[in-house]
């Protein structure tokens, strides 16, 4: 007997096939990487906070000890992207609990369904596959099959990252430090940490998704300058011991994803 989950009466998840299907438009479907599918299964089964440590044995089994933390964050990111491709607010269904783990949003309603027959594995042209996987032991035929798409996605992210780097280089070395600092405004203070946000970046509250990473750095470098855009779940973060307009502010720069990986 196969177990399936109907989420918010709109998205059906089939763990046996790692498949997400739009309940009202079955042609809209996404095949998840196996680790992402197992992460989602555990969240649906528990219905409450799942800690980081609880994910590893469930998702990777005997290989859990070899898995790095960023592998978990990347698979959660893939899960959110897949859900968003089915429904616009799907990426909000999995909530990050800083320094603890992940849980389902209170807005998520789950109905468990069972069927005697296993759903056929989708191979139709309209099936969208999420091809980025962080499992280091992928079968060689899987890698060969998806290599062109993987190269396309990697090239896209590389070009975007290069553009951001070029912007920062020009901004740092062509303009004065005071002009650079004028592009930011103080958004909030968290004890010693002062969070400054780029005036032209996306809505200020969205920058708080990067707080877990920022707060780890603030003890030594309390002045934070962050630029994030809607194009990617990525932010450029400059962390300084002194305000950036000062002489020798001693700064470090990072690119950080919403999951907190640099």
Image: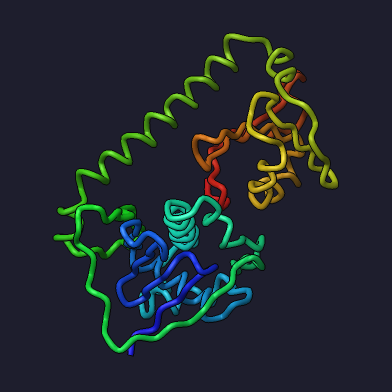
Instruction: Give the residue displayed 51% in from the left and 69% down from the top.
Output: 9
Q: Nearer the viewer, residue 215 or 76?
A: 76
Find residue 141 and report its horizontal and vertical position in percent.
14, 60
Instruction: Give the residue displayed 69% in from the left and 46% down from the top.
Output: 208
Task: Report whether residue 56 is seen.
Answer: no
Find residue 223 and report its horizontal and vertical position in percent.
75, 34
Q: Nearer the viewer, residue 48 or 119?
A: 119
Q: How many marks?
A: 0
Q: Is residue 86 left or right of residue 53?
A: left
Colour logic: rainbow
Quadrant housing residue 239: top right
Q: Is residue 208 left or right of residue 11?
A: right
Task: Report whether residue 75 is seen.
Answer: yes
Residue 129 drawn above or below residue 152: below
Which quadrant: the N terminus?
bottom left
Instruction: Give the residue displayed 37% in from the left and 75% down from the top.
Output: 15
Instruction: Give the residue displayed 79% in from the left and 42% down from the top.
Output: 193
Q: Is residue 180 left or right of residue 258?
A: right
């Amino acid at each position: 007997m196969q177990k399936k989950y109907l989420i918010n009466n709109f998205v059906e998840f089939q763990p046996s096939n790692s498949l997400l299907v739009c309940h009202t438009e079955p042609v809209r479907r996404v095949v998840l990487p196996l680790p992402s599918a197992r992460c989602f299964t555990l969240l649906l089964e528990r219905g409450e906070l799942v800690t980081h440590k609880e994910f590893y044995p469930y998702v990777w089994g005997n290989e859990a000890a070899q898995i790095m933390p960023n592998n978990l964050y990347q698979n959660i990111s893939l899960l959110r992207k897949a859900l968003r491709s089915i429904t616009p607010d799907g990426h909000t269904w999995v909530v990050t609990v800083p320094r603890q783990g992940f849980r389902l949003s209170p807005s998520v309603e789950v109905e468990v369904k069972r069927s005697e027959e296993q759903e056929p594995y989708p191979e139709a042209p309209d099936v969208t596959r999420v091809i980025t996987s962080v499992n280091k032991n992928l079968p060689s035929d899987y890698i060969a099959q998806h290599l062109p798409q993987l190269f396309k996605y990697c090239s896209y992210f590389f070009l975007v990252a290069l553009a951001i780097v070029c912007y920062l280089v020009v901004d740092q070395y062509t303009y004065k430090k005071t002009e650079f600092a004028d592009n930011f405004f103080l958004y909030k203070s968290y004890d010693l940490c002062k969070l400054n946000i780029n005036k032209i970046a996306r809505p200020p509250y969205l920058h708080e998704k990067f707080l877990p990473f920022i707060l780890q750095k603030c003890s030594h470098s309390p002045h934070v300058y962050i630029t994030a855009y809607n194009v990617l779940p990525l932010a450029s973060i400059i962390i300084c011991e002194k305000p950036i307009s000062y002489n020798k502010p001693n700064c470090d720069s990072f690119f950080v994803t919403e999951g907190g990986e640099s």
